[in-house]
Every structure is written in C-alpha cells, then in structure tokens.
Image (cartoon, rainbow, N blue to C red):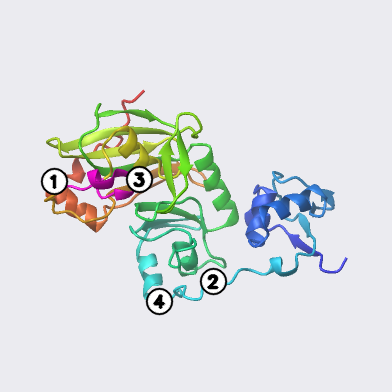
Amino acid sequence: MSGVTHLTVPEDAQGIRLDRWFRRQYPNVPHGRLSKMLRKGEIRVDGRRARPNDRLIPGSVVRVPPLGDLAEAPPPPPDAPGPESGAGQALRDAVLYRDAWVIALDKPPGLAVQGGSNTRHHLDAMLDALRFDADERPRLVHRLDRDTSGVLLLGRTAAATDALARAFKSREAEKIYWALVVGVPRPKAGHVDAPLAKKGGKGGERVRYDPNDGRPARTDYATLEVTGKRAAWVALAPRTGRTHQLRAHCAVVLETPVLGDGKYGGRDAFLEGADVADRVHLHARAIDLPHPAGGRLQVTAPLPEHMERAFRFFGFNESEAPADPFADMA
C-alpha cells in the first residue's frame, strides 16, 4: 500500500511503550485514531500485531499506515523565541543540572510549561534552546503551574524521558515544595487527604474539594517557621499529582492560602501592609528520584527573587530548614 512507512526503533527508545513512542513521532495523530489503528492491526511491530503497552526493542521495525497530513510535524508558534534569542539564553542560564540523560531547570514564576488557548509564550515552544550538544530537543517529564517556580525535569532522550515519567507515576519521585501561607496551619504538621475534582467556568483551570466525586489527593505538610499568627513558612510534599493540589489543600482544607494566590484564597491570600510581591509564593524546592542511568538524581532550586524578598520581610532564614522536614512523619 502506498504511503506506508517503516521506522526502525533506535537505541534510545529501549523499553518505551509503543503508544508513547508513536505519539512522539506523530504528535498530530489523535489518541482515538492511534487506538483504532492498533486495534485494526494497521500498526505492526516486526510484522506482528501490537498492543499500546508493548515495550519496544531497539532494531525492531514499526509499520506505520498512511497518515496524510497528520504525519507532518506541527510548526512552532510563529512568535516562539529562537534558541539564540534573549529568552533562549535565559533558559540556558536557568539550568541547574545537565548530563546526557537529564536537564533540571529552575523554572521562573510566570512562565507556562505548555501552551493553551490564551497562552502563546510557554516553555514547550522554546525547548530547542536547550538542545546543547544533542540531536533532538529535550522532552517535558512533568509540569509546574505557571505561577510556581522551581525544579522542572526534562528528558534528553526518549528512553530517559520514559524512565523519569515512570518514576513520577510510581511515586518514586520525592518532591518538596516551599510555600509562604497566610495564617498558621493547625496542627502545624500532618497529612491532608482531601479528594479534588476539576471545576469548569471562567478564570482558567481550577479544582475544588469534592469528597464524593473527587480523585484522591494527599499532601504531607510541615510548618518550618511562623511570624506570630500572621504567616508561616511551610514545606509541602505531594503524595499524589492532582492539578493545583497544593494550592487547593492549603486554601480550602488547611484554611491557610498560599500568599498571593487569589485564585484559591481570594482576599484572604493577601496581607495588608506586607512588603511582599503580588504573586504566588509557591516554589518546587527539591526533587529526589531514580536517575535513568542508575543511582539517584537530587536537585535543589534556589528561592526566586520575590520569595527571597518575602523571607527577608518575615525574618525567615532558609539556611535553617531541615534537610528532610518529613523525616519523623509516619
């Protein structure tokens, strides 16, 4: 049949699920179309019918049926900054760690990770600036909210990306966030188990506490320092990965919204007379997970400027933070 393509699985795709690998080669193909082609046997591996979760072996040949215009790579946004632009250099300056498998980036607050209907400027459109010596652009492993700063991981090969993604999915990735919250959590340390459900409406993506139809969401928290009853420095460890989980748990369950987070805390998220920036004070401080090549990958991100300013105002000292604020938690 004319238009059929045969692709050889490269070495760096060892062990990747067939459906994930296919979507990386043909990002324009909808999930439903891919599922139908696999179900009908139009996509084959080494001449045999294949399942979405089949793990690939380097050297295998994948048969791809005619895809028409869907085979073409999507063009970058017309206004995406080039690798040599000032924005591209700023991304390179934000690299915390890099090796042949992984890039750890210190994502600045205000930068969206992926695009949307009202988002033209985002990290995903600028990843060519982080190729360095590689033949291909790095791939996103996970996401951070636009307003959240801190450690964000990228895979430099398909196999590394898949291995890192599995670590997140299996909860082998240990993440610690720092937040400044309005008020003091009671008790000062503990666990939050509060199901969350996505909520429609204006104002962008949002979640709400929903004990009946929400998806399980768990967060460990520990108060590191307080300033009277006005504000607290809190360490947060998400044990699940729901959208806006930390922000919703702080505001709705603990009733101590993240400072500057009007989306979830409303007026209660702001302190009158405080010399702090009018933005969300939530930071992905550290991550510890298995490295794709073996051993552990541990990365820490410094506080962004607006949180440094708030720490000075409240008299908090980041050097006094315990290495593991959750060490004594059962």
- Quarter of the picture containing the N terminus is bottom right
Q: Dot 2: few (<14), some (14–19), or many (≥20) neighbours within 10 Å? A: few
Q: Which sits earlier in the primary sequence, circle 3 or circle 4?
A: 4
Labels 2, 4: front one: 2
Q: Nearer the viewer, residue 14 or 36?
A: 36
Neighbour class for label 3 at 10 Å: few (<14), some, many (≥20)? some
Q: Amino acid at mark 3?
A: Ala
Whichever of callouts 2 and 4 sits on the residue coming sooner in the sequence is 2
Mark 3 highlights which residue?
A: 286
> Please, what secondary structure does the residue beneath circle 2 have?
loop
Q: Are marks 2 and 4 in contact (CB under 8 Å)?
A: no
Q: Which residues are magenta?
A: 259-271
Picture coordinates of residue 20, whole percent (x, y): 64, 51
**Circle 2 residue:** 76
Badge 4 amino acid: Ser
Q: Position of residue 113 (x, y in %)?
A: 44, 58
Q: CA distance from mark 2 to mark 4?
A: 15 Å
Which residue is under mark 4? 85
Residue depicted at x 33% and y 43%: 177
How far apart marks 4 and 1 lie (CA) works out to 37 Å
Q: Which mark is residue 314?
A: 1
Is 262 within the magenta? yes
**Amino acid type indicated by mark 1:** Phe
Residue at left offset 49%, top offset 46%: 291
Of the numbered discs 1 and 3, the one sitting upstream in the chain is 3
In front: label 1 or label 3: 1
Secondary element type, mark 3: strand
* Viewer-side residue, 261 vs 131: 261
Distance (Cα) linking label 2 and label 3: 31 Å
Marks 1 and 3, Cα distance to the nearest angstrom? 22 Å
Residue at 50 percent of width and 42 percent of height: 168
Would you say 163 lies left or right of 112 here? right
